Amino acid sequence: MIPVLICALVSLSVADLDVLDPELVNSRTIYVTENGPRLAVVAEQPKVLARRGGNVTLQCRIQRDQSLAPNRKMRIKWTKLTFDYLKEVDVFVAMDYHKRSYGSFHGRVHLQGSSAMDASLVMTDLTLEDYGKYKCEVIDGLEDGTAVVTLDLEGVVFPYFPRLGRYNLNFYDAERACRDQDAIVASFEQLYEAWREGMDWCNAGWLSDGTVQYPINTPREPCGGRNTVPGVRNYGLRDKDKNHYDVFCFTSNFKGRFYYLIHPSKLTYDEAVRACQKDGAQIAKVGQMFTAWKLLGYDRCDPGWLADGSVRYPVSRPRRRCSPTEAAVRFSGFPDKKHRLYGVYCYKGQN
């Protein structure tokens, strides 16, 4: 319903007209109309949670004034927002029978289309990079509206540094390091959620927005001071080329099998790689171990080689001689690859 403000008409006699200003006698009644929005776009579920490899629907509904004439050329466009909202990445656009998907979204997105007023976007085979905020924009003639939906992925954040040691990664090295471990650079929101769940790590690392931060739950002298409050410490934006730190990576569900390879003897690194290959698998990555530990409850007290040359083992049930104080992925360092002291963790993907 369009609200209308109408100036009231007053009944006046001839005598009344004699006392009025002559200019008022010739004045006209004015009808004032307040034009409210005749098109609204609503995100019925502003935040959705999914897993890598799964499917999800980003809800977007159109509320259209019935007084508007039917418009077959109503335009629906979905874009992905960057962390600073200064850039938008095209995802999908539709107008009448014309439809197009873009870039890495090509062939993986389509409109749900349950009705003419349904602009919801269906995304399939989700990747780690799909995480983020999406804008639904509808243009109907001279009317338009937008809504924003956040796509969150269930997963795990883990700190990472390479064999070179701590504080050796600029931002672009950090991106490559996470990709090599089946992960992406974590966002602040992901790190903050990990901190809320108890993550405590004293070494600063890159986040996806170019800031450097670290989560502290137990304040202590080397980590901002004993008398400070728990929180996510923030170094702010840093030079992506010149500054060097560790990195916080994020990974999610995988389609495959992570396992400790039962082998009659301990292995060097090269022997570990070949042993997994002989079993029809590959040596596992750090992100795959964290996923198996966090999302699948994988528990094994045997140190084993991983693809980056590190030795780790996942403990979901703390016990004596095996991470007695907390559930964690235990890190044994980057030993000499020629040492025949460890087993190996393998990963067998699904075709």
Image (cartoon, grey):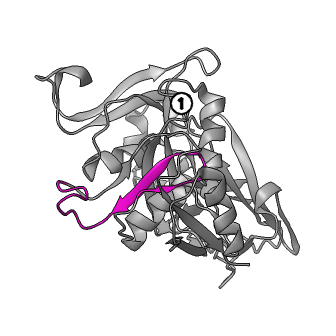
Drawn side of residue 213 relative to residue 224, left or right: right
Question: What span is in magenta?
Answer: 303-325
**Residue furthest toward the bottom?**
114
Seen from the viewer's position, the closer of residues 204 and 160 is 160
Residue in the foreground of this view, choosing between 226 and 12: 226
* Residue 8 visible somewhere in the drawing: no
Snapshot quadrant of residue 273:
bottom right
**Which quarter shows the C terminus?**
bottom right
Q: Residues within 10 Å of mark 1 (few under 14, many from 20)?
A: few
Look at the numbered disc 1 and give the secondary structure of its residue: helix
Q: Is residue 222 left or right of residue 160?
A: left
Residue 258 versus residue 305 in the image, above or below = below
Q: Is residue 161 visible?
A: yes
Task: Give the number of marks.
Answer: 1
Residue at 65% across, 66% down: 275
Up/down of 278 relative to 28, above or below:
below
Magenta includes 315?
Answer: yes
Based on the picture, tell me whether residue 226 belongs to the magenta stretch: no
Give the image location of residue 46, x and y in percent. Answer: 46, 62
Q: Position of residue 312 (x, y in %)?
A: 43, 52
Q: Residue at x 19, y 63 (%)?
A: 319
As drawn, is 150 to the left or to the right of 72?
Answer: left
Which amino acid is tagged 1?
Glu
Where residue 100 sits, quadrant-wise, is bottom right
On screen, residue 244 above or below 314: above
Image quadrant where residue 317 sits:
bottom left
**Residue at the top extreme, as displayed:** 242
The overriding secondary structure of the stretch rendered in magenta is: loop
Pointer 1: what residue? 23
Residue lying at 41% horizontally and 73% vertically, measured from the top left: 296
- In the rendered image, residue 39, in percent from the top left (x then y), is placed at 61, 62
